[in-house]
Amino acid sequence: MARHLITSAIPYINGIKHLGNLVGSQLPADLYARYQRARGNEVLFLCATDEHGTPAELAAKKAGQPVAEYCAEMHAVQARIADGFRLSFDHFGRSSSPHNHRLTQHFAARLDAEGLITEVSETQMFSHADGRFLPDRYIEGTCPNCGFDSARGDQCDNCTKQLDPVDLIEPHSTISGSTDLEMRETKHLYLRQSSMKDQLEAWIDSKADWPVLTTSIAKKWLNDGDGLRDRGITRDLDWGIPVKKGDEDWPGMEGKVFYVWFDAPIEYIASSLEWVDAGTGAGVDQGWERWWRTDKGADDVRYTQFMGKDNVPFHTLSFPATILGSGEPWKLVDYIKSFNYLNYEGGQFSTSRGRGVFMDQALEILPADYWRWWLLSHAPESSDSEFTWENFQTSVNKDLADVLGNFVSRVTKFCRSKFGEIVPEGGSYGPQEETLIADITTRLAAYERQMEAMEVRKSAQELRAIWVLGNEYLQSAAPWVAYKEDPDRAAAIVRLSLNLIRFYATLSSPFIPDAAQAMASAMPESPDAWPTDLAATLNALTPGAAFAVPDNLFRKITDEEVEEWQASYAGVRE
């Protein structure tokens, strides 16, 4: 049994996320976790809310709440929505947890002991209008590299170039809009990433199987311009993890907190301690260290991270620098699956600008499976992709309603009308069935290859092709015709088709778990393992056993609904 540690990029606490955030990390991570569990492997799937930094403070201020209270409330909201989308986290943690406080302070102490922390007196942007130092991401201006007019002070989201606020053309505060900014002196801790460049580059070079998107972004940060820069890991803020050297105070760093991008990835580890504290799930009693410490059993773990391309630099460079630099035997990521952006109706999804369909809104419109199928089958892997209501309607109606839902409905209702709600006896499988089993065997192997490779869209294509094979078989075998002259032949066709529904439940569960459960529950013998002998799997149901005719799995989306949703969700959310 293989062991898979899976983490999704942790969503920020300030508000409900849009569909682009969902498909860029959490949803494909859930797909992979569900698949590995279905194959009988041991999985620990972790996520959390990212709760520190200025955005949380400002969101709490806008909501009229203390920041700690706001974060607790929004964590509960995000956890509820994640459950609504059937995201099967083993634990959904919080970066503000005591475990993450201690671990972050521990890593800082280890990095300092290894000579990788330096104190730097520097000047930072101070906004007179806001009365505070501005974090880099709260300064925007024009990128000097590509001309993008909404580049942040730490990075341009358009060209991904690493920036400093002073690099920006015509910078302004995103809090107040003020351009009355001045550079003031302050002192901060820096992680000496530049001294680890060769080590990090050698590590990245060893990952020959990583997606081009992942490695190209990492190499760009390593080598473009002045190359890998040292990174500030503290900030002049009130909300965050206090700067300490382990359990000890850090002289000169009083009143400062660790930068959110230093502590947030450490929460991946901390969330496993929270998981143990929660005491739920298989393997909890064996502890967290067997997942994260190579000296405690983690050397046989396969660790996969899922994230949008904007998070790649921190997960290929900064977080590995923290892990490697500690000098301790921590588990490093084995594979990073990164995604491009999902756009919305000719523009960009944006949480900060309130554009697009948000996760809570989506669940009010249609159940989770509709969204899961469309997002995964259109995942932005090789390039950006775009959500349009027309495309959503077409995919749902053709793939889910016409192919899968129609097959299940036709088989179960025909069986009920001719044989009753039992698996029919009589007849035996012949050449048509043997051909079908051979074709599905080929497709199943392809589906498994694509799922193992985390090729999300190709996996969806293979799954749909397997559904199509069932429809084509049913149409060509035509049990409604066979029944008139040879009821036993019709019984064999229907029996195989009922077995196909049971088989489809297993295969479809990573993509559309609710529909899969409905299919499995309707059959007299729920599938309990991934099919390894397809001929046996498609002959597993006992003749005479009772089944249920499920409600229609999926309904079609009408043109009128599309027009209504286009008008109602025009891309603005207050």
Image (cartoon, rainbow, N blue to C red):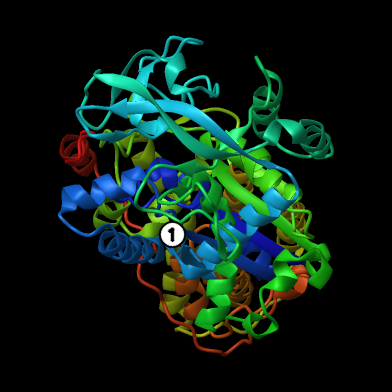
Q: Where's the C terminus, which quadrant?
A: top left
Q: Residue furthest front?
A: 251
Query: Quick one: 504 or 20, which is closer to the camera?
Result: 20
Residue depicted at 25% across the width and 37% down the height: 354
Where in the figure is residue 319, as x and y percent of width and height?
Answer: 64, 46
Side of 16 where 341 appears, left or right: right
> From where the camera sits, is residue 453 visible?
no
Q: Nearer the viewer, residue 268 or 8?
A: 268
Q: Quadrant of residue 301?
A: bottom right
Q: Residue 152 or 358: which is nearer the viewer?
A: 152
Where's residue 124, x and y in %?
41, 27
* Amino acid bearing label 1: Gly
Specify the quadrant of the image occupied by residue 196: top right
Location of the N terminus (image quadrant): bottom right
Q: Please give the residue where the numbered disc 1 appears in the rendered image.
A: 405
Residue 11, relative to residue 350: is it above or below? below
Kindly state the secondary structure of the residue where label 1 is placed: helix
User: Relative to 76, is 131 above or below?
Assistant: above
The residue that appears at 35% across and 71% down in the rendered structure is: 551
**531 sits left or right of 469 in the view:** right
- Residue 20, how many percent across, how many down? 41, 40
Which residue occupies 58% across, 72% down?
A: 273
